[in-house]
Amino acid sequence: MHSKNFKLMTLLPVLGSAGLLAFAYYQEYVNYLDPCPLCMLQRVIVAALGLLFLLALLLPSWKPFWRRLIGFWLVVFSLFGIGVAARHVWLQSLPPDQVPDCGPGLGFMFDNYPFKEFITSVLSGSGECAEVSWRLLGLSMPAWMIVVFAIYLLYSLWWVTRRVEPPQPRR
């Protein structure tokens, strides 16, 4: 694959991440859907994926070392995103009597909890994570995020295995 085409294929997920984050903020500030801690964590993962692809645009990604290094982290974040979104869907499927109590807000936990306890609290979810307030084609937002992260995973695997020609010097 020519390096210019590869750069374009690297830009697409950056734009996808920006679009997903724009949609999330639209839902929050226009439709007044407050994000729960797991939603916020999924936003961070989407942003991390977009930033990794953006970093790949800036580095000589035609070199296998950089592509493999960035590809490794793309796969890790994609899998982590699938796990967080799956946990979120699981919480939403619980009967009302088994839903965990609502905990403190994400900002409070980040400011006051030790890092390990903060991560554990966020990943365990809370009662507000079990609420389904938006659906598209019968799927909740976290269920759609499983699809999105799976697409990122497959795209990252495709992206990292491409053979890319180094740019040709200008004559």
Image: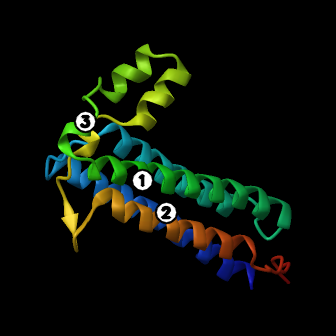
Q: Secondary structure at mark 3?
A: helix
Quadrant of the snapshot with the N terminus: bottom right
Q: Counting residues from the N terminus, which is met first, the one under dot 1 or under dot 3?
A: 1
Is the residue 2 above or below the residue 118 in the image? below
Whichever of callouts 2 and 1 sits on the residue coming sooner in the sequence is 1
Give how far across and how far down residue 8 sits, in percent: 60, 76
Q: Crowding at label 2, few (<14), some or many (≥20) Cα neighbours within 10 Å? A: many
- Residue type for callout 1: Ala
Circle 1: element type: helix
The relative height of residue 100 versus residue 40 in the rendered view (above or below) is above
Residue under circle 2?
149
Q: Amino acid at mark 2?
A: Phe
Left or right of residue 118: residue 26? left
What residue appears at the point 29 percent right and 25 percent down from the top-left corner? 103
Sequence-wise, which precedes: disc 2 or disc 3? Answer: 3
Residue 106 image point, x, y percent: 35, 29
Crowd rating for badge 1 (residues with CA inside 10 Å; few <14, some 14–19, many 20+): many
Residue designated by label 1 = 85
